[in-house]
Amino acid sequence: MKKLFSLLCIISIVAVSNCTSVPENNDPILGIWVRNNVSTDANKNTSNIREEWIFNDVYLGRYQSYSNSKLDFYTDFKWSEENGVYTIIFGDPQVPDVTVSLEQNEAPEKLTLDNGSVFATRE
């Protein structure tokens, strides 16, 4: 009897796990977004700062900051979309949370802040 019950449990678990599916996320924000800055200090030394936001389809992502092609900082973030407005919530207190909108009518596509300034562009 125990063998029959165990067999039925295994069959039901396999059947249930095969019937569930992860919904596909085709949000237009998916992919890599970048912002490049060039800064010059008092000694006229220039440094290239590159920031990347990598959005994936399970509403998570990775933020990376490079200085002169060297990785300086990275952290994970969560993102959500409501009525065309994206909220990015970082897991690290060093990076403030941000709200952006996607502008697809120009090439390259842009993420803009509430004031209209460009936050990042699609790579």
Image: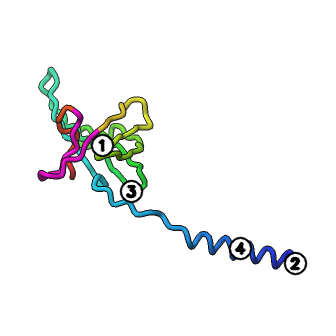
**Circle nearer the N terminus (1, 2):** 2
| First to last magenta residue range | 100-114
In the picture, the disc for residue 10 is 4
Q: Secondary structure at mark 1?
A: strand
Mark 1 closeness class: few <14, some 14–19, many ≥20 residues within 10 Å: some
Horizontally, residue 20 falls left or right of residue 101, namely: right
Answer whether labels 3 and 2 touch (C-beta < 8 Å).
no
Q: Which residue is mark 2?
A: 1
- Cα separation, mark 1 vs mark 2, equals 57 Å
* Disc with the residue nearer the chain's start (4 vs 3): 4
At 30% from the left edge and 43% from the top edge, which residue is drawn? 85
**Alpha carbon of mark 1 to alpha carbon of mark 4: how far?**
44 Å
Q: Residue furthest front?
A: 83
Which amino acid does the dot numbered 2 rest on?
Met
Residue 57 shows which numbered tag? 3
- The residue carrying pointer 3 sits among few (fewer than 14), some (14 to 19) or many (20 or more) residues within 10 Å by Cα, namely some
Point out the tag, 1 or 4, that comes first from the N-terminus.
Answer: 4
Q: Judge depth for marks 1 and 2 and give the one in front.
A: 1
Quarter of the picture containing the N terminus is: bottom right
Disc 3 from disc 1: Cα separation: 16 Å
Looking at the image, do the residues carrying marks 1 and 4 touch, with CB atoms under 8 Å apart? no
Q: Give the distance between the C-alpha atoms of the residues marked 2 and 4, in whole angstroms.
A: 14 Å
Disc 1 + disc 2, Cβ < 8 Å: no
Q: Residues within 10 Å of mark 4 (few under 14, many from 20)?
A: few
Q: Amino acid at mark 1?
A: Val
For marks 3 and 2 on the same chain, the one whose residue lies earlier in the sequence: 2
Q: Is residue 103 magenta?
A: yes
SS of the residue under disc 2: loop
